[in-house]
Image (spheres, helix red, strand yellow):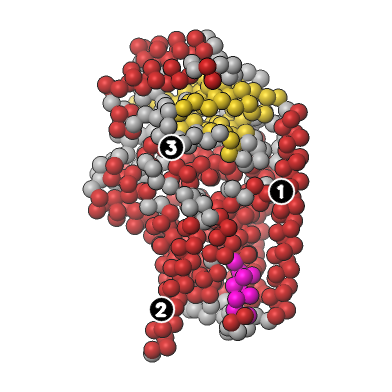
Amino acid sequence: MWIRIKSYRIQIVLVLLSAFLLTLAFPKADQGWLAWIALVPLFLALRGTEVKDGFFLGFGFGMVHYLGLVYWTALTMHQYGNLPVSQAVVILILLAGYLALFPGAFGALLAWLRPKPHVLIIVAPALWVGLEMVRAHLFSGFPWELLGYSQYHALRIVQAADLFGVYGLSAMIVFSNAVLSLAALGWLEQAWQAVLPSRRTIIAAGIVFAGLMTALVGYGGLRLRTIGRMADTADHAKVAVVQGNIDQAQKWDPRFQVLTTVKYRNLSLQPSVKGAGLVIWPETATPFYFMDDEVLSKMVIEGIKTAGTHFIIGSPSYAAGKDGLIYHNSAYLVSPAGQSAGKYDKVHLVPFGEYVPLKPWMPFIGKLVAQVGDFKPGHAGSTLAWKTHRVGMLICYEAIFPELARAMVRSGAHLLVNITNDAWFGRTSAAYQHMSMAVFRAVENRRWLARAANTGISGFVDPCGRIVAPTALFQTKTVTEQVSLLEASTGYTRWGDWPLGLLAFGILSIFIVHRRFYN
């Protein structure tokens, strides 16, 4: 009995250590290298477990990790949703609990499949990636900081995202952790699922991993040079992003609407913006219905005419529908003459932020943003025609959904633009996390990405994933950059996550069938 209790204690310590290390791999800590070893304690804790124990160990790992990763949810709910601290904390715990179900399923399925050591290095990456893909789509999806995103600063490593997306890096990281876990078990002379990893298995796995890493880094170096040459010969344009730094508590207050409008107009007329072919304002930069409010819209349009260039302006909008008014979270493209040249309506809305899911059954639940009615989604893949080029818009957390950016590039987008209002996050790590995921959209599709955020982080990401001229949080600033407008299509743009997804689920299907019928 004492031995069993002691074993549980060791497993709990290993799980906590794994969760702590993985959380440090993401912003703000930004220790991405830790992701390559962070899951080793979790694997060691899972060896020899039954299905129920595997689930609870994985769930405990996920609970601790996600509480540390999305802790800012409670702050947002309390400060801007006006929820009492106790209720905000409960929502955070529920969100972390939901996300923890996926590593819980990882632990349970590994325990049920009972893969032998040489099979573990194949099954574990496929299982992890399969569960990430399910999380990215289930209940509208929440692919926030998937494992591969921890590498956004590793320039050579992220280049492979133009083939396999972020999930490819997730698979590689899990493979690394599985190989290291087998090496640790071999050194400690401990078994994995009652089988002691042989020296031959460990050496072979290490050689495969070294070969894959060499190929990954080599491909990264090759693509950095190739994309650099392509950018030099492509069309170029000068683009400016404006960070107005408007206090969220004042943003929708009618008393501050004029001041907000004047501030954005003045920032857009600064000398640093002169010559820009496109000026970008953040999400809902106009806290009124642009092209509808006569006085405030006129102020904006006069500023645009003075600047004499194209603008992208985030604003709520509405249109008549058969059941009444339809509201959208929109981005207007405005010509130098002050006329609307196109409008993009946000496609992937934020639950409880922009609409209430199952509202007829939950009328007691409101939205964080109560100034307008429930938003309705627009059409995926629609782009804005800017001069002879096309712009793909990503509003707010649409930047964390790779299929949206991919659809726009497939529709001809030469430039990706992410407008957002991360003031909700305060000075927490959320704004940094949000920016880290946007990096992958540029690399996957080999497009420049311009990012305008109300309170930051604004700036640019080049087609190789370099973050260019990032602003500080809560800084009033304009940033101007010369961007290249590439046209080439990547493997990821053409095929998306389908090849890797089919491979992962194919591998899992084979081993599930084998476990079910032949064990």
Q: How far across and down, in percent of the image, does residue 424 sit?
A: 37, 39
Q: Which residue is mark 2?
A: 9
What label does residue 404 carry, if any?
A: none
Q: Which residue is mark 3?
A: 473
Badge 3 amino acid: Leu
Magenta-drawn segment = 177-186
Quadrant for residue 259, please give it: top left
* Residue 350 among those drawn in magenta: no
Q: How far across and down, in percent of the image, does residue 475 sit?
A: 42, 32
Q: Residues within 10 Å of mark 3 (few under 14, many from 20)?
A: many
Q: How far apart are the alpha carbons under marks 2 and 3?
A: 42 Å
Q: Report the front residue among 322 and 379.
A: 379
Q: Residues within 10 Å of mark 1 (few under 14, many from 20)?
A: many
Q: Which residue is mark 1?
A: 220
Residue at horizontal 44 percent and vertical 60 percent from the top: 65
* Residue 183 among those drawn in magenta: yes
Badge 1 amino acid: Gly
